[in-house]
Image (tube, helix red, strand yellow):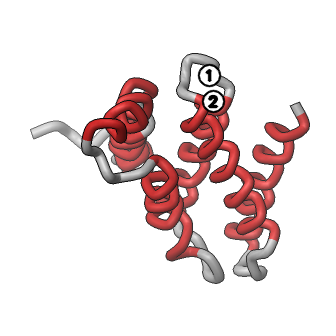
């Protein structure tokens, strides 16, 4: 029985925390390097397919429609993590190649998307900004 203190439940922060935790595992440097190495002894899930699947799960559904606030948060965190990973020299070259490809794919997708409302348009413009900034460095 906690008395009401006027504090909102911070739903977006809670969901984003869970999303970050999951992305942290899916994009862990050791996991990605292991995927490449294990392809030599039986792993048939190629890194390129893995990244395409992640990209599709995070972006495809929203391609030409309004992006809700939960997915906007997820997409920004995903792009941030891909950019950070792309700069990591301790990653296998195959993984860095796929990261570059995925970032380029996302950039083109954002640049070619249809107008979908002020919030979504601003969100996509921000992703374009992050990606162009990365490619300009």
Q: Mark 1 points at which residue?
A: 88
Is disc 1 placed on a helix, strand or loop?
A: loop
Q: In this view, does 119 lie above or below 104?
A: below
Q: Quick one: quadrant of the C terminus?
A: top right
Q: Is residue 65 above or below residue 125?
A: below
Residue 111 visible (yes or no): yes
Examine the image and state in which quarter residue 83 appears.
Answer: top right
Is disc 2 placed on a helix, strand or loop?
A: helix
Q: Residue furthest left?
A: 1
Q: Which residue is drawn at 79% across and 55% down?
A: 128
Indicate the position of residue 104 as horizontal and vertical percent values: 74, 54
Examine the image and state in which quarter residue 33 appears.
Answer: top left
Q: Which residue is drawn at 68% across and 69% down?
A: 120
Q: Is residue 59 above or below residue 91?
A: below
Q: Mark 2 points at which residue?
A: 84
The residues bearing labels 1 and 2 have C-alpha atoms spaced at a distance of 7 Å
Indicate the position of residue 131 as horizontal and vertical percent values: 77, 47
Q: Is residue 100 above or below residue 61?
A: above
Mark 1 Cα-neighbour bin, 10 Å: few <14, some 14–19, many ≥20: few
109 or 64: which is nearer to us?
Answer: 109
Q: Residue at x 60, y 30 (%)?
A: 93
Q: In this view, does 101 lie to the left or right of 6?
A: right
Q: Residue at x 54, y 52 (%)?
A: 73
Task: Say if mark 1 contacts mark 2, CB within 8 Å.
Answer: yes
Residue 4 - label: none
Q: Quick one: quadrant of the N terminus?
A: top left
7 or 128: which is nearer to us?
Answer: 128
Indicate the position of residue 65 as horizontal and vertical percent values: 62, 82
Q: Residue furthest front?
A: 40
């Amino acid at each position: 029985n906690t008395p009401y203190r006027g504090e909102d439940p911070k739903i977006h922060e809670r969901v984003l925390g869970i999303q970050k935790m999951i992305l942290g595992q899916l994009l862990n440097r050791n996991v990605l390097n292991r995927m490449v190495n294990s392809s030599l002894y039986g792993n048939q899930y190629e890194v390129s397919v893995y990244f395409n699947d992640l990209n599709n799960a995070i972006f495809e559904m929203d391609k030409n429609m309004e992006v809700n606030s939960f997915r906007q948060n997820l997409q920004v965190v995903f792009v941030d993590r891909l950019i950070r990973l792309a700069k990591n020299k301790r990653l296998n070259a195959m993984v860095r190649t796929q990261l570059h490809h995925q970032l380029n794919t996302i950039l083109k997708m954002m640049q070619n998307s249809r107008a979908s409302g002020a919030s979504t348009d601003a969100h996509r413009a921000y992703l374009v900004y992050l990606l162009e900034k990365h490619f300009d460095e």
